[in-house]
Amino acid sequence: MALDSPYTGIVDWRLVALAYAQDVQQAGGAIMMGFEATQITMAAESPAGSPEGLKYPVVVRSSTGEEVRCRFVLTCGGLYSDRLAEISGCSTEPRIVPFRGDYLVLKPEKSYLIRGNIYPVPDPRFPFLGVHFTPRMDGSVWLGPNAVLAFKREGYNLFDFSSEDFRDAVCYRGLHKLVMRNLAYGLGEMYRGMFISAQVKILQKYIPEISHNDVIRGPSGVRAQALDSDGNLVDDFVFDGGADELSSRVLHVRNAPSPAATSSLAIAEMIADELEVRFTL
């Protein structure tokens, strides 16, 4: 399958990610799956039998006891970016609050109605784009999404639940303030998520021909929304270093504004520039 469609500019981001991974491996890097980082510290001594001393002074440990030694550490943890920062001694803020977006899918026989991306004028109060029409590589058309609080950081389904993630979100004063300021908006998003007809009513503002019978429920995504304690949605880059001596060795990307996929190469260049300055490379 091709990475992109020359007629629409739409790309298959799974294939793009695999291509990035191949570039990393060809450059001599290794990709470790299932490594849950639980601790980032400075080593007190060099590894036993190591002739290089403390050339790799940063130690990253996993929940299963695995250990990786590094010269420098860069984290881009998405939904877990705040927790990765915390295990190296950083502030708990901004906090990541997960918002799930549920899509509808246009039935194949009606896909002729949409020939390109359609986006509404965004509401400047929110980072969410509102409902939009997105043609996909396979010819399908996604409609939406809404934006509702997810009860799990990787809660892609309606009934996914994590007691730890739920507690972190609902006990956070930043979320309390956000909800109280935007109660009507939030209830409206929940209503549109529950009832297809409510979502379709908004879609009809752009394509009046669409009816309830033309759509089915589709996939969902989860947005890693950074939120401060005053209830403000963080819409700019947030970089953070570790505490004390880690600060010259560790860089956390705690927030990268949307659209991160579309701008991935530009964002990578910006992060590389930040690394050069912080680590004096």
Image: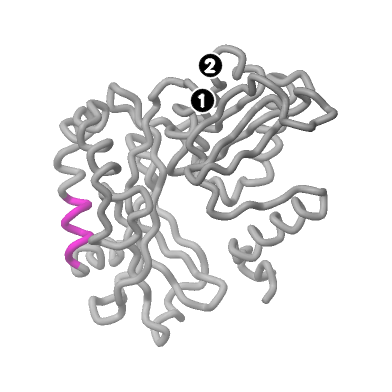
Looking at the picture, tell me which residue is in the foreground, 127 or 27: 27
Q: Position of residue 25 (x, y in %)?
A: 76, 54
Q: How many callouts does the rendering have?
A: 2
Residue at image coords 64%, 32%: 73
Q: Is residue 113 above or below residue 66?
A: below
Asked whether residue 273 is in view, the answer is no
Determine which of the numbered discs, if any, sits on residue 243 in the image.
2
Q: Amino acid at mark 1?
A: Ser
Badge 1 marks a residue whose secondary structure is loop
Left or right of residue 163: residue 96: right
* Nearer to me, 127 or 86: 86
Give SS at disc 2: loop
Where in the figure is residue 112, as x and y percent of width and height? 46, 81
Which label is found at residue 88?
A: 1
Quarter location, residue 179: top left
Circle 1 packing at 10 Å, graded few (<14), some (14-19), many (20+), is many
Residue 277, percent across and down?
72, 20
Depth check, front residue: 11 or 203: 11
The reply to whether discs 1 and 2 touch (Cβ–Cβ < 8 Å) is: yes
Up/down of 191 relative to 89, above or below: below
For image coordinates 43% across by 43% down, the residue present is 79
Residue at position x 57%, y 72% in the image: 137
Scheme of colours in the image: one colour
